[in-house]
């Protein structure tokens, strides 16, 4: 890259960003900043009450999954629907679903990951359906892959459920989580846009843990430190991207770690019952609980990569949304407390506004 080719102001902007984050990422932030003309970090900001939100009425999104439809599940408050993310230095481009569909014409966009990817994929399909309510669509599910199609645009939006990105292999001894093996890549290999995410399943133990052993470097372990295992799997993923992705064909995104709000002492309400009864976000731009440890590891792995990966850096802005979870208005009603997924409409709509902002700059 020849610096002389850039205008002075862009060069200065890139230089100043260089001091904040590592080179690889500063380049990508620079691309967004260039388009907004202000050197603005879209991920630094705060939530503002805005009655023009939500972006869609969830009761007119016919394919919404019950677990995300908090209003239908009896959630009594509505303010959580009306917050807009406001970056400190600029405004987020207004989401334009028709424009996004035109840009994606003939393309396939896939979310790969756990149910937080499902959450974002559902949000995006509702946002697009809202933009073109008369357009025909189809929704099919085959194994771990859900496909939402807008035939008139020849656009496919897919969700591939793959909680670890690396493989869980069943053997006669039990299920093995193989940190070196990434056969799932066959599914996402030929996509035009892929948005990855993994984290929540790495912490599961007991009955919620879907493996019996961990394999890495030819050795089998009964267990490993989960953050270490997470990082090793991300390295395997990063190596696969570096050796297989052609960035002129496939745009790679990573959905930053989606935080849960199961422990209220992180935001200074030690006596609260997890996220239950939370109706307001934190209004500042700092989360008292500090950065998420998994997000820090993810960023470390990304610095080692050769191919460009755009981080949808949603961790901090979502940490501020202690009010955004279903709590007891998820799954089957009041059976359990869900402080990790997000109500729809809600926080994942903002992730998609940020995805849209990144895509319109990249094209
Ligand atoms: C994500 O955002 C946080 C808070 O604004 C920042 O500290 C971090 O460096 C960002 N990470 C990346 C990869 O941009
Ligand atoms: C919540 O976090 C605090 C501070 O890290 C810790 O002391 C406490 O044990 C946690 N509570 C639960 C229920 O995990």
Image: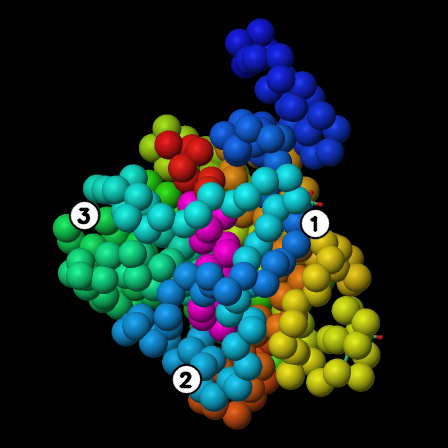
Please state the quadrant of the image where ligand 1 appears. top right
- Residue drawn 45% across and 70% down? 344
Q: Nearer the viewer, residue 322 or 80?
A: 80
Lower position in the chain sequence, tag 3 or tag 2 = 2
Callout in the foreground (2, 1): 2
Dot 3: what SS? loop
Numbered disc 2: secondary structure = loop
> In this rendering, is residue 109 above or below 344?
above
Q: Which residues are magenta?
A: 340-356
Q: Where 87 falls versus 292 (above or below)? A: above
Q: Is residue 340 left or right of residue 123?
A: right
Near-viewer residue (295 or 246): 295
| Color scheme of the displayed model | rainbow
Residue position for label 1 = 296
Q: Position of residue 13 (x, y in %)?
A: 65, 24
Residue 175 location, x and y as percent?
Answer: 49, 70
Whether residue 344 appears in magenta in the rendering, the answer is yes
Q: Looking at the image, can residue 226 be seen?
A: no
Question: Which label sits in the foreground, 3 or 2?
Answer: 2
Mark 3 sits near ligand 1, with its Cβ under 8 Å away = no
Residue at point 37%, 72% (across, down): 58
Query: Residue 215 sits in which quadrant?
Result: bottom right
Q: Which residue is mark 2?
A: 72
Q: Mark 2 and mark 3 in contact (Cβ < 8 Å)?
A: no
Residue at (56%, 71%) from the top-left corner? 80
In the rendered image, which residue does mark 3 sit on?
Answer: 154
Q: Is residue 298 magenta?
A: no
Residue at the far top: name it.
Answer: 4
């Amino acid at each position: 890259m020849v610096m002389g080719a850039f205008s002075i102001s862009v060069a200065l902007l890139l230089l100043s960003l260089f001091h904040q984050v590592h080179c690889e990422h500063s380049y990508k932030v620079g691309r967004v900043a260039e388009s907004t003309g202000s050197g603005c970090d879209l991920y630094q900001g705060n939530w503002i009450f805005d009655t023009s939100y939500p972006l869609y009425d969830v009761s007119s999104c016919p394919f919404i999954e019950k677990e995300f439809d908090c209003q239908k599940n009896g959630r009594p408050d509505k303010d959580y629907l009306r917050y807009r993310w406001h970056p400190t230095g600029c405004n987020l481009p207004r989401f334009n679903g028709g424009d996004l569909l035109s840009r994606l014409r003939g393309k396939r966009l896939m979310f790969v990951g756990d149910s937080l990817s499902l959450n974002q994929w559902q949000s995006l399909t509702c946002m697009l359906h809202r933009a073109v309510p008369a357009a025909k669509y189809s929704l099919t599910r085959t194994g771990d892959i859900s496909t939402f199609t807008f035939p008139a645009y020849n656009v496919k939006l897919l969700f591939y459920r793959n909680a670890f990105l690396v493989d869980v292999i069943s053997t006669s001894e039990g299920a093995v989580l193989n940190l070196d093996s990434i056969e799932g890549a066959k599914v996402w290999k030929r996509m035009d846009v892929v948005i990855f995410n993994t984290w929540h399943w790495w912490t599961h133990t007991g009955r919620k843990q879907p493996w019996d052993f961990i394999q890495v470097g030819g050795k089998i372990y009964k267990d490993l430190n989960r953050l270490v295992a997470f990082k090793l799997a991300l390295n395997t993923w990063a190596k696969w991207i570096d050796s297989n992705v052609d960035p002129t064909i496939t745009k790679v995104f990573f959905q930053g770690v989606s935080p849960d709000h199961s422990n209220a002492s992180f935001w200074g309400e030690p006596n609260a019952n997890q996220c239950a009864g939370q109706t307001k976000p934190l209004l500042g731009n700092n989360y008292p609980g500090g950065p998420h440890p998994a997000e820090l590891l993810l960023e470390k792995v990304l610095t080692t990569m050769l191919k460009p990966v755009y981080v949808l850096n949603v961790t901090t802005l979502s940490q501020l949304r202690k009010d955004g979870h279903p709590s007891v208005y998820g799954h089957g009603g009041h059976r359990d407390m869900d402080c990790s997924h997000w109500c729809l409409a809600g926080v994942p709509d903002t992730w998609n506004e940020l995805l849209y902002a990144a895509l319109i700059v990249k094209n």
